[in-house]
Amino acid sequence: MKKDREKKQKYSNITDATILGSTSEESALYASANREHLSVLDKLEEISKRKINPNYINQNINQQAGYSAEIKEQAHVNANNILAGKRERVRQYDDLSSEKKPQVKKLFPNYATPKKNHEIVDYASVDEKGNVIPGTLTQSKFVGRNGTECFEKFLSKDYEKYLKNGMKMEIPLLLQRVERLVMLVRLQAHLREV
């Protein structure tokens, strides 16, 4: 009897340790994914506090909403990559290190590689060492009121340079999120005026 109880207790201890280990690993995984979303809050808050030129209210609000959407999209993709066990991460061009920006220059030699706001690259996927993964450079435009309108705008002359350079263009499924961000930015702008 005593041996049976000891055996059951030992088995129970092993089971508990296994459950604890797997739960701990899963918790760490979800914590890392959540950290991606939390890490962008300061940047989003900074964007929301930017001044809006009274002569260009709609343009400024749309720019802020689009930039905010890019930041949220980056966090969303990175969180999903973490949960899927992928080591690849998305980085905005502005956030690439000065050593990695020349990798973009090699892919697009006809365009300058400024410190901020590359002319045709918004973000790229990078490997574990931060190296730009070719074929992942993306231009993100949150234009139009819906996916169809966004697609039509992508085909216009204004977006020719992206298509000619083989840029990956995405018609964001985030347009509803962008519309909510525009409303939030407008509300914040209104509150600043009051």
Image (cartoon, grey):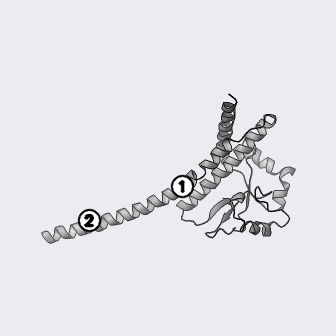
Instruction: Tell me: 185 left or right of 119.
Output: left
Q: Are marks 1 and 2 in contact (CB under 8 Å)?
A: no
Q: Quadrant of the N terminus?
A: bottom left
- The numbered mark at residue 35 is 1
For the residue marked with disc 2, what is the amino acid? Ser
Q: Image point 84% across, 60% down: which residue?
A: 164
Q: Quadrant of the C terminus?
A: top right
Q: Image point 44% across, 58% down: which residue?
A: 27
Q: Mark 1 to mark 2: distance in Å?
A: 34 Å
147 shown above or below 31: above
Secondary structure state at the residue bearing disc 1: helix
Return the x and y of residue 138 as percentages of the image width and height: 73, 59
- Nearer-the-camera pick, 64 or 152: 64
Sooner in the amino-acid sequence: mark 1 or mark 2? 2
149 shown above or below 2: above
Return the x and y of residue 192 as percentages of the image width and height: 68, 32
Secondary structure state at the residue bearing disc 2: helix
Q: Nearer the viewer, mark 1 or mark 2?
A: 1
Question: Is the residue marked by circle 2 packed among few (<14), some (14-19), or many (20+) residues within 10 Å?
Answer: few
- The numbered mark at residue 114 is none
Residue identifier under label 2: 12
For the residue marked with disc 1, what is the amino acid? Arg
Residue sitting at the far left: 1
Return the x and y of residue 61 as percentages of the image width and height: 73, 39
